[in-house]
Image (tube, grey):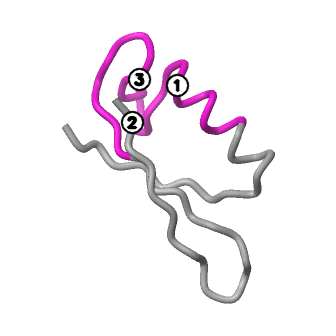
Amino acid sequence: MLFFGFLPSLGQGAETLIVGYSENLPLVFSGKNGPPAGLYIEIIHYISKKEGWQLQFFSGM
Protein backbone atom coordinates (compact mmCIF):
# COMPACT_ATOMS: atom_id res chain seq x y z
CA MET A 1 0.00 0.00 0.00
CA LEU A 2 1.33 3.44 -0.90
CA PHE A 3 0.17 6.82 0.36
CA PHE A 4 0.92 10.03 -1.51
CA GLY A 5 0.92 13.66 -0.42
CA PHE A 6 2.20 16.85 -2.00
CA LEU A 7 4.07 19.66 -0.28
CA PRO A 8 5.16 22.71 -2.24
CA SER A 9 8.90 23.35 -2.22
CA LEU A 10 9.93 26.79 -1.09
CA GLY A 11 11.08 29.02 -3.94
CA GLN A 12 11.50 26.37 -6.63
CA GLY A 13 8.04 25.61 -7.97
CA ALA A 14 8.80 21.89 -7.74
CA GLU A 15 6.70 19.62 -5.57
CA THR A 16 7.75 17.13 -2.93
CA LEU A 17 5.85 13.89 -3.00
CA ILE A 18 5.71 12.18 0.38
CA VAL A 19 5.31 8.43 -0.09
CA GLY A 20 4.38 6.11 2.76
CA TYR A 21 4.87 2.42 2.11
CA SER A 22 4.52 -0.97 3.76
CA GLU A 23 6.30 -4.23 2.92
CA ASN A 24 4.59 -6.20 0.15
CA LEU A 25 7.06 -8.40 -1.76
CA PRO A 26 7.87 -8.05 -4.66
CA LEU A 27 5.92 -4.83 -5.12
CA VAL A 28 7.45 -2.85 -2.22
CA PHE A 29 10.20 -3.83 0.22
CA SER A 30 13.14 -2.33 2.08
CA GLY A 31 16.32 -2.35 0.03
CA LYS A 32 19.70 -3.65 1.17
CA ASN A 33 20.80 -0.26 2.50
CA GLY A 34 17.41 0.83 3.80
CA PRO A 35 15.76 2.75 0.95
CA PRO A 36 12.59 1.20 -0.44
CA ALA A 37 12.74 -0.93 -3.59
CA GLY A 38 10.39 -2.98 -5.74
CA LEU A 39 8.08 -2.63 -8.72
CA TYR A 40 5.88 0.14 -7.31
CA ILE A 41 8.93 2.10 -6.16
CA GLU A 42 10.46 1.89 -9.64
CA ILE A 43 7.19 3.12 -11.14
CA ILE A 44 6.93 6.10 -8.78
CA HIS A 45 10.59 7.00 -9.46
CA TYR A 46 9.90 6.91 -13.21
CA ILE A 47 6.83 9.14 -12.89
CA SER A 48 8.60 11.56 -10.53
CA LYS A 49 11.41 12.10 -13.07
CA LYS A 50 8.86 12.87 -15.80
CA GLU A 51 6.90 15.25 -13.55
CA GLY A 52 9.88 16.90 -11.81
CA TRP A 53 8.85 15.74 -8.33
CA GLN A 54 11.15 15.25 -5.37
CA LEU A 55 10.38 12.04 -3.44
CA GLN A 56 10.47 11.50 0.30
CA PHE A 57 9.73 7.96 1.55
CA PHE A 58 8.65 6.76 4.98
CA SER A 59 7.72 3.32 6.21
CA GLY A 60 4.23 3.74 7.54
CA MET A 61 2.93 0.30 8.38
Report the Cα–Cα distance between label 3 and label 2: 9 Å
Against 9, residue 41 (above or below) is: above
Q: Please name the amino acid that badge 2 sits on.
A: Leu
Label 2 Cα neighbours within 10 Å, binned few <14 / some 14-19 / many ≥20: some
Report the Cα–Cα distance between label 1 and label 2: 9 Å
Quadrant for the C terminus in the image: top left
Q: Which numbered tag is attached to residue 6?
A: none
Q: Are marks 3 and 1 in contact (CB under 8 Å)?
A: yes
| Left or right of residue 48: residue 29 | left
| Residue 52 belongs to the span the image colors magenta | no
Label 1 Cα neighbours within 10 Å, binned few <14 / some 14-19 / many ≥20: some
The residue to which callout 3 is attached is 28
Quadrant for the N terminus in the image: top left
Q: Which numbered tag is attached to residue 40?
A: 1
- Residue 46 lies, in percent from the top left, at 71, 35
Span of residues in magenta = 20-46
